[in-house]
Image: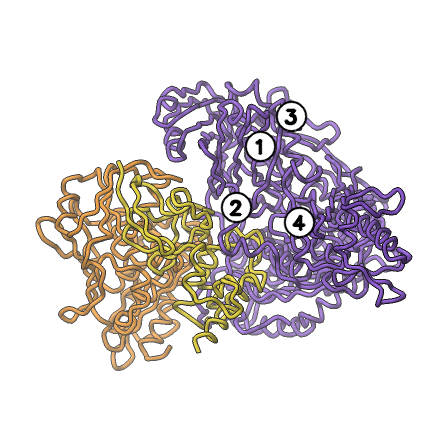
Chain colours: A purple, B yellow, C orange
Amino acid sequence: MPAATRYLGKPLKRKEDPRLIQGLAHYVDDLVLPGMHHVAILRSPYAHAQIRSVDVSKAQAAPGVVLVLTGADVRGSIGSIPCAAQIPDMKAAPRPVLAHERVRFVGEGVAVVVATDRYAARDALDLIEVEYEPLTPVVDPEKAIEKGSTVLHEGHKDNVAYHWELEGGDLKAAFKKADKVIKQRMVNQRLIPTAMETRGVVADYKPGERQLTVWSSTQIPHLLRTQVAAMLDVPEHSVRVITPEVGGGFGSKLNIYAEEALAGYLAIRLGKPVKWIETRRENFQGTIHGRDQIDTVEVAFKNDGTILGLRIHVIADLGAYYQLLTPLIPTLTGLMASGCYKIPAIRTEITGVLTNKMSTDAYRGAGRPEATYLVERTVDLVAAELKKDPAEVRRKNFPKLSDFPYATPTGVIYDSANYPGSLDLALKLSGYKKLRQEQAKARKQGRCVGIGLSTYVEICAMGPSSAMPAGGWESATVRIEPSGMVNILTGASPHGQGQETSFAQLGAEILGLEPGDVNVIHGDTAIVPYGIGTFGSRATAVGGTAAYKALMKLRDKLAVLAGFLMGENPGKLVFSDMNIFSKTNPKKSIPFGEVVAAAYTAKRLPPNMEPGLDATTFFEPSNFTFPFGAHVCVVEIDQETGDVKLLKYVAVDDCGNVLNPLLVEGQTHGGIVQAFGQAMLEEAVYDEQGQLITGELTDYAIPRAADLPWMETDRTVTPSPVNPLGVKGAGEAGTIGATPALANAVADALSPFGVRHVDMPFKREKIWKLMQGVRAPLGARQDRVRAPLGARQNNGGRRSK
Amino acid sequence: MSAEIQIRVNGKSYETQVEPRLLLVDYLREVLGFTGTHVGCETSICGACTVLLDGKAVKACTVLAVQASGSEVTTIEGLSATAPATANGNGLHPLQEGFWEKHGLQCGFCTPGMILASVELLRTNPSPSQTEIREGLSGNLCRCTGYQHIVQAVEYAAKKMKSRKR
Amino acid sequence: MIPAQFEYVAPKTLEDALRLVERHGDEAKILAGGHSLLPLMKLRLAQPRYVIDIGRLRGMNYIREENGRIAIGALTTHAEIESSDLLRAKCPLLAETAATIGDIQVRNRGTLGGSLAHADPAADYPAAVLALDVEIIAASTAGTRTVAVGDFFLDMLTTALRPGEILSQVRVAPLAAHTGTAYEKLHQPASGFAIVGVAARITLGKDGTIEDAAIGVTGLGPKAFRAAAVEKELRGKKASDKLFAEASRHAARGVDPLSDLHASADYRREMAAVYTRRALGRAFARAQGKA
């Protein structure tokens, strides 16, 4: 990245926003095609049952109904849902787009209705008669792997999907050398991603052209095209996928779903455009869930706080079937089990388990929040055991700056870092020392206050193709049009991250133009070269680098042409202010537009130069990147109710160089608040019958504005050597770093009550229970009347720097 | 079963035969094509469907179109017309401008509802504190921003609207 | 989420509405603001054949003083109650309670009459109206009758309203001298409904003894109720934090608390005590002219 920049690294406001703030953007549900039909899906009310019969005759006869199909009707015509992840000796658990013999989770599709009107389609669902024979539901993953448990899939001997192990270093020696060993079980609960826009699909088939167009709210348009074509057994070039505006994904739209193939099938079969829009209940039941691990950690350490070894066992609840990456996600936990520490020996063992629930898959952070949570909780357990300050135990175990690139025993190479740097800044910004003094004072007054710390590293910018099921490169095409206007076509598929702006900044910077001259196009497989998509905090580090490389190719070509036209050395030209200047003689210049025009009119080109200005790159990263940071927070617990309030939050993150700090700040805020959701509020709860009882937003709480204090965020900058931009990725770091900070704060608050660990979410009753029957661990009991709930924890007047 | 409704939306009158069960949000989106109003949860929690009904913010997923007959509705598409053009003449309501300036949105799905709920907030409380803004937006969920930039966006608009009144 | 089909009638007068309600009986549901009924209909838990929209009736949306009492029309919205100067001055408990319901969009639509007639066990108003000893006016083609609020809530989603009746008005006495009120609520984090909501009203005598105390509790059991045992402990005694703490322990007496995803019966019982004490503390401070 150039040292002095005009647009790069500047907090430009977004080019995306005018359409979004005026209601002019088009999400998939906003699309209307002539003669469009509407699709509704009947879903299983049972977690586990045999389908005895499905009678659609009444539904088929209902007004407005065009077609009703069951799982048996489509089973030969549509392939099962693809899983790209392969783990050695993994049992197969493919999911049909509609169940035909057995249903294995509540919400699994059983029949589909197509009607001329959305309301009529919904009405017809009530007329389908399904006879189920209920089977024993398998809900608890630990019971699911016990001998004698009901088995979900025919041909399996049990519900274990796979065993996966990763070991590095001499674990036996580590535990032998240890002064102490602590063992702790931690549950990383199941979450519902809850993008504000549910999923939706519109499909249209033009028989004359043999073209199927699928508009889907997805993060991966090209992969979706390949997979839908395969599921429907049609040539890939006859399928076009378009992502209109996408209302949030967080990993939940990094998938191939039954409805995407079904809609395509129905459009072809009926010769009519069809639309399916997911209801929120369907979204909760049938769009992927996240996390859901039971982790048992054993840590070996010395009395000075040095951590010698970790032994981790993960029970990963995969749900009933595999979605695109289901089996892979827990393995990322094993990969990142070293955290930001130099731990000589680590062993992770994962048991993937099949249960009668929706599949788990990538949800913001995907495997790394789980790793960070268990490592960061473990470090705090060590600190608590040794009665040492958690900041000091962390510092003790950081790798040295000279260790980078640092190879962990789990086989990962951390690109670059300055862990003490971010920790120091976070401690300083939060006034950590003073916070500890205030905490001691508060405790004497009988207040239950906790301070939480987390230092994290995560793996992102996914990633080298060797480690990615479908390849990990990204594509970009840059076209400079004859008028001098620039189009960047990216294979990334942003849905809120703001790359229409940041890539325009990049283009403007490199070509010496205004960001308004650079347009970013994405999410249309007929226009954009094949790409991998947006997930794993990869769009800027991988997609942005591809764009950078394509831009540089064209800049080089323009320089040669300009040099030729000006009689200058192409290596001595500067692109600035819509002109190309001579470095040696700034008075000598040629307008950018004139050089572009020359490339297209092609009347005066250097020998062997092709006309036109169009460049495509596929950038293959040599490694992942590893953002890191340090978070500090303060919570207070109402001892009478167990209510936990977040009083203060300070985050210092390092995602390398930054194209637009405003966008990074937005990602950080959002990530922290999603982590807050996991820590405090969110949990997908299935009852013993496998019913999802957090089935709507009336029962599944996600954070509201009033739940949160002012967050103070800052950054350190440690460029990544993995890509020429030096960027790392910012999409998931907040979620990864914040959950353990919050958990550590709550555990710290509860430590006077003899509590060593408490599982998330920190719901009031759970916390309250832990404090019952413990005799006055704190000073005089607080007696002041608290402000009413919700009115309290915002530090109204406090501003950011 | 149908009923005739008369309704003004964004300054224009419409007369339509509708099924009585038609939800106001579906009427606005599917009959009139005002698709800036979004459906997020269907249970009057998330606020993505917020519109102004006779000037007051309501959740259009929990109002029947027939209930709104005789009323005036403002959706995000009509919002800028309700406020005199801002100083720089960009045709945006100060709240729309605030959300843009302060990066108060990412995916944008909650944004129209969030902006219209903020209109209600500033109508009843023109100079809210940060706490009051957070409380006032308790009927609107955003999964992207973490709300902090939204709070700043509303503060921006409040300041701008006050200075204009002077 | 789409309601099943129904026939819609929008009577212009209360008389017409009452005739329709009488004629259609069980097959009809009364629609006011719609924030209790429409969610049930969208889930198809309610599939009435007729929906009688009383939202358009004139003259049922008011807050006014009548013969020394405050009369509130059934169609008055939560937002109107929350912001009413008259109520804030003379019956602040109702305004305070209304302000805790849902969010502003919900309060702009939901009505007092609709909420009371629906009798959701987690609704906020029932605690307040019980503590205020309001009178509920039920209209029918035969005329009107007055129901004391103590006789109004019968069970979960069940009130003393008879077939053919429409709740038309709520009457409440203005705040007496040396009286303080408060509503304290533990909200369900997702929906905002009350896990426990306690409305307290305390009247102090000249010597600081508690002359009268009324405590309404919602969220705890299948229906809102008066915490008579707490009231008994308080009456005639000198107010103190200690007394409030001791008396509050009886908040759940005689009630079998609900248990659900968000709170167990035990927790609800304990929180009833905590929130009763908090409500009493604030009501007392207000009765003394503080806060």
Please say whether residue A383 is visible from this viewpoint.
no
Point out the tag, 1 or 4, that comes first from the N-terminus.
Answer: 1
In-image side of C60 versus A219 (left or right): left
Residue position for label 2:
A26
Sequence-wise first label, 4 or 2: 2
Disc 2 element: loop
In this view, which residue lies farthest toward the front? A603
Q: Which residue is mark 3?
A: A230
The residue wearing badge 1 is A213
Question: Do discs 1 and 3 belong to a common subunit?
Answer: yes
Q: Is residue A86 left or right of residue C90?
A: right
Amino acid type at image mark 4 = Val
Q: Earlier in the sequence, mark 1 or mark 3?
A: 1
| SS at mark 4 in the image | strand
| Residue A498 image position (x, y, % from top left) | 64, 53
Amino acid type indicated by mark 1: Thr
Q: Is residue C243 above or below residue A468?
A: below
Same chain letter for marks 1 and 2:
yes
CA gap between label 4 and label 2 equals 17 Å
The chain that hosts pointer 3 is A
- Answer with left or right where residue A320 lies relative to residue A312: left
Q: In the rendered image, which residue does mark 4 sit on?
A: A520
Residues packed near mark 2 inside 10 Å, few (<14), some (14 to 19) or many (20 plus): some
- The answer for how far apart the CA atoms under marks 3 and 4 are is 29 Å
Task: State the residue at coordinates (79%, 50%).
Answer: A598
**Count of numbered circles on the image:** 4
